Image (tube, rainbow, N blue to C red):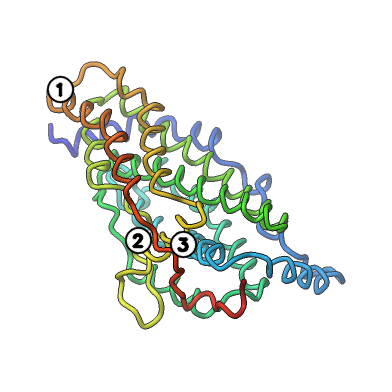
Amino acid sequence: MSIKNIRLEVMQFLEKNVDSFVDQYLIPVEKIWQPTDFLPNSQSDTFFDEVKELREIAKELPYDFWVTLVGDTITEEALPTYESWLMDVDGIDNVERNGWSKWIRQWTGEENRHGDLLNKYLYLSGRVNMREVEMTTQHLINDGFDIGTGRDPYKNFVYTSFQELATYVSHNRVAQMAKKYGDNKLSKMCKMIAGDEMRHHHAYSEFVNRIFQVDPSEMMLAFQYMMKAKIVMPAHFLRESGEKISTAFEQFSDSAQRIGVYTAADYVDIMQKLIDKWEIDKISGLTDEAEKARDYLMKLPARMAKISERLVIPQESHIFKWVEPALVR
């Protein structure tokens, strides 16, 4: 039997539990928070006073913070790209509306709220050039992206396990920084988003855990493949208006590292957390090739940590079209 057919069998085996995954890791629409819960109420007589207060507090936030928040927002708003990508993964059938496609649609529905909330906050803050932000978002969706997983569900689930934890780290740190600068409402928004991301991380990492139980060698090889290739962030393909895909992500990443929102050390830490979570050192019944993959994975965080220590981050901020320096500190 081909590797692809074995993966399909495993996905069909796991699909029997999709409803329980939905119940355990996702929240019904009527019960989950919505963006409006955290924003000035446009139906209220106090709306303009609330907006004025939001804008005054927003003036205290520094330049790199705004760049990072804009980058996070754009990434969250590119959800159509991520859903269309995942719907094409082997074992996920949106035509027949199988259990996995139900999961992807409902996961997307939860994720979609994040971009809605952050976009409205940015708009009301008056600190950013919303037209430039909107053009970057449209470019990101137009350009699409390639995360190096192909249609392989094993590789895709490694990617989403990693990525959801990375977005948790980023949003949680932004929440901490917003609180430090006195923006308690933005802090709460980002804290709620971070909570969603952690819940989704638990789901995708559980999918990988289940696969390790039934197809350990192939799952190990998929994990090794993704760590060797490195996890490419969705924001990797950011570009500003009139520019080509080139350096925007690197400059955005520099801003995030400069203020400590998401760093090379965090990348290594997430890798180690996944190795520990899946108990890579204890998995048995591996082929010789998979044993070599395990050895590679166990040594990788220490190697990557040494490399990350040598990284030099530019001290000067790149000036993005999204954020005009005259409008922020």
Does label 2 or label 1 sit earlier along the sequence? 2
Q: CA distance from mark 1 to mark 3?
A: 43 Å
Residue type at tag 2: His
**Residue 21 at x, y = what percent?**
49, 34
| Residue denoted by label 1 | 287
Does label 1 or label 3 sit earlier along the sequence? 3
Disc 1 packing (10 Å; few <14; some 14–19; many ≥20): some
Residue 41 falls left or right of residue 70: right
Residue type at tag 1: Thr
Disc 3 packing (10 Å; few <14; some 14–19; many ≥20): many
Give the quarter of the figure containing the N terminus: top left
- The residue mark sitting in front, 2 or 1, is 2
Residue 123 falls left or right of residue 164: right
Question: Which image quarter: residue 121?
Answer: bottom right
Question: Which image quarter: residue 314?
Answer: bottom left
Q: CA distance from mark 2 to mark 1?
A: 34 Å
Q: CA distance from mark 3 to mark 2?
A: 14 Å
Numbered mark located on residue 236 in the image:
2
- What residue sits 55% from the left and 61% below the top? 115
Is label 3 in a helix, a strand or a loop? helix
Give the quarter of the figure containing the C terminus: bottom right
- The residue mark sitting in front, 3 or 2, is 3
| Residue denoted by label 3 | 255
Question: Which image quarter: residue 283?
Answer: top left
